[in-house]
Image: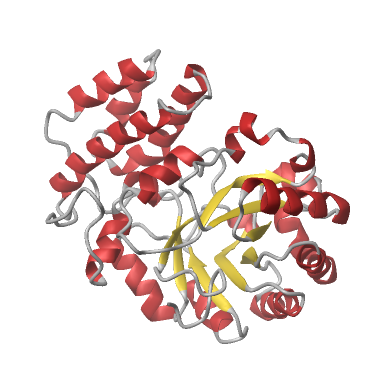
Amino acid sequence: MLERPILRGEVNFPLCLAPMVGLTHVGFRLLLKSYMPPGARTIWPTEMLNSRRLPHEVFARVPECSRHPSETDLVPQILGNDESEIARSVKRLDEEWGASGIDINMGCPVRKALSHNYGVALMGDAQYARDVVAMTVRHTRLPVSVKLRAADAGTDVLFRFAEGLVEAGAEWLTLHPRRAEQKRRGSADWSMIHDLRHVVPVAVIGNGDIQQADDVFRMLDETGCDAVMAGRALTARPWLLWQVGERLGWPAPIGREGERAPETREEEGQEFGRAVLKLIAILAELPWGEDLLIRKLRFFLKNACPWLEFGHALEAKMSVVKSLAEAQQVIALFFSQTQSMSPRTDLRY
């Protein structure tokens, strides 16, 4: 177990997936889980879910709400600020959907979230944000967490803001130390994660600029954070979970017993081909319709391919496929030749 509990002590693995629009769906989660060491547990997010819609959604028809019966430790992320909508949303996520926790998004900088006064907009009013946490805690028995960005007004404001969230009942916090105006530009200031970890009494998850296993351990060492969250890099390196587990002495993933995690550029290139084929097989089992499944696959590759040496060529080939079966053939042919992964790419894309 981690030093400070996440998911009330159920988490024992220091790396987790970030909630990302269009990416953090059941297909991608299942792909990542195939690289988890047996016995390892971490939190698994959804895409951002709007609490204005959740009370009325038919979960089985909404891709963002899809989950596999085998999934555990799911912590859906909600956007919201209205108590009645939040109350109905978290009740349904708990009783009907099977959530293990609730995460409140206070880090989304997109205009649509700002126009409704949630996402990072909540960071402009500390009392209002505190009230949102309190109302969520009031209506669920599940642990509640909050994902934050750096405060435009400075670290002291951020720390006072975070303390208010904890006092309102947040059981852990995730910090992406870029200001909203930065979006993806510049570097994440990990010193903020370090300082926040020593300000609040709850667990802190660090997020930002994770591309390799070395980054995971460097963030843990430099910030003292309780766990690390990675986003787009996990599209390119889903086996990052395997690499981290291997360094910590965990066994290889089920089905890969006796193997070592890929390390060289060429080994990672070969593994990426396997991962995409595995994702296609997972997507083929989902009842979303071929057009949506192809769009999901293309969006996954758009985020992953900057790490692949000839990723632009693969994206071009995949832009014209009409079915998952055709996509499978294209992937198999492309990776029948040696491919190579770059250790790092420009995260501003």
Q: Quadrant of the N terminus?
A: bottom left
Q: Quadrant of residue 122?
A: bottom right
Instruction: Locate residue 35, reporting x and y percent.
Output: 30, 51
Query: Which sits in the foreground, 178 or 128?
Result: 128
Query: Which sits in the foreground, 331 or 191?
Result: 331
Q: Quadrant of residue 151?
A: bottom right
Instruction: Locate residue 130, reporting x and y percent.
Output: 79, 70
Query: Which sits in the foreground, 249 or 126?
Result: 249
Count of marks placed on residues? 0
Q: Is residue 85 left or right of residue 78?
A: right
Residue occupying the point 17% across, 40% down: 270
Is residue 117 at all visible to an observer of this figure?
no
Residue occupying the point 24% across, 48% down: 342
Q: Is residue 281 above or below residue 319?
A: below
Instruction: Locate residue 101, reporting x and y percent.
Output: 62, 61
Is residue 152 at all visible to an observer of this figure?
yes
Residue occupying the point 25% across, 40% down: 272
Residue occupying the point 76% across, 67% down: 137
Q: Quadrant of the C terminus?
A: top left
Query: Which sits in the foreground, 40 or 221?
Result: 40
Q: Is residue 128 left or right of residue 36?
A: right
Q: Is residue 54 above or below residue 109?
A: above
Figure coloring: secondary structure
